[in-house]
Image (spheres, helix red, strand yellow):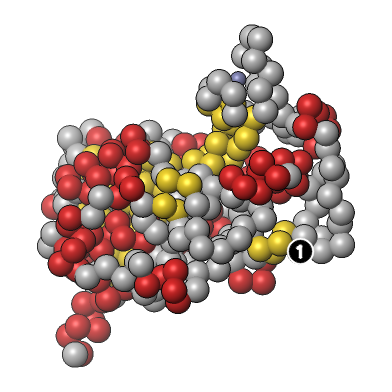
Amino acid sequence: MYLFLIRLSDMSEFRKAFAKAKNIAIITGAGVSAESGVPTFRGEHEKWRKWHSQVHLNKEAMSDYNILPSELHSLNLSTWIYPPPSLPQDLASPEAFSRNPSRVWEFYHYRRELVLDKKPSAVHLAIAECEARLKKQGRSVVVITQCQDDLHRQAGSKHVLKIHGSLLETRCMSCGQVTVNKQSPICAALKSKGAPGANVSDAQIPVDKLPRCEERDCRGLLRPNVVFFGETLDSHILTNVEKEMELCDLCLVVGTSSIVYPAAMFGPRVAARGVPVAEFNMNTTPKTEYFMYHFQGPCGTTLPPALAPHESEEL
Ligand SMILES: [Zn+2]
């Protein structure tokens, strides 16, 4: 037992695995964005006005997701729905958007404005620097992120799979066009709207004043290009995630509470192949027991030294 505990937090053991790895997959979550000051919408900050911004996972909903380690390998991730759509959701669901697009746009406008002025943190920079350095050695780093901001790319990461979409992209409800959009505000009618206070009332913006498609002759209503609760994840992206999970010979799970599926299963699935997986998080998670390494604390402190140049690297 004593040896096991030592192993959990032995950075020099992790560094040996890091030095040998050719293909590294780094799974990131809200804790990484939090290093840049982006709110996680968890705990006391979970509400926007009077609505929950997260789905509450009750026991019933979770029981569908109790996967045995022996089953991990045969899961078809592309059919999974994110996360269990068993509870009503007033802000981030397709139903909420069709019922009240003005309110949903106010919520996303608020979130866009929160990320637009943020800068990449030490974690984002360490990951991007590691990718660039290892590329010169013929090794690869891929970021598989649940974060909906653009901070990994801003830091310089090239190979990023955004499984939950992007706050800074729009998708047209009519023609399907996806467009990067970093305008602030995204449209005139949303200027100064979206305040989160419990007593703020809906702006009730007419639908023709909400963000509209700029493709010629379209003018369709735009929605944020994020995965709403109850929607399936992009199958093209998930196919790429599956490939990376098969390919990687080292996996890092950084700043995620590992409760939102299917992302919560990525690390355990890699571990089931016998590949070393290291978790970097403030706390242990329901998935910690699956992993070879666990480094506890703010990932801004624990991750940069883990990814720093190894003495065996030819720089
Ligand atoms: Zn359109």
143 and 175: which is toward the camera: 175
x then y, percent, for residue 99? 70, 45
Secondary element at image label 1: loop
Q: Is residue 167 above or below residue 73?
A: above
x then y, percent, for residue 135? 25, 35
**Residue at label 1?**
50
Quarter of the rendered image showing ligand 1: top right
Quadrant for residue 183, please give it. top right
Asked whether residue 168 is in view, the answer is no
Q: Is residue 132 above or below residue 110?
A: above
Q: Is residue 230 above or below residue 116?
A: below
Give the farthest residue toward the top: 216
148 and 138: which is toward the camera: 148
Residue sitting at x 76%, y 41%: 102
Task: Give the left or right position of residue 163, taking residue 113 as reference.
Answer: left
Residue sitting at x 17%, y 55%: 74
- Amino acid marked by disc 1: Lys
Task: Give the left or right position of residue 73, taking residue 260 as reference.
Answer: left
**Quadrant showing the N terminus:** bottom left
Residue sitting at x 27%, y 68%: 67
Residue sitting at x 31%, y 71%: 66
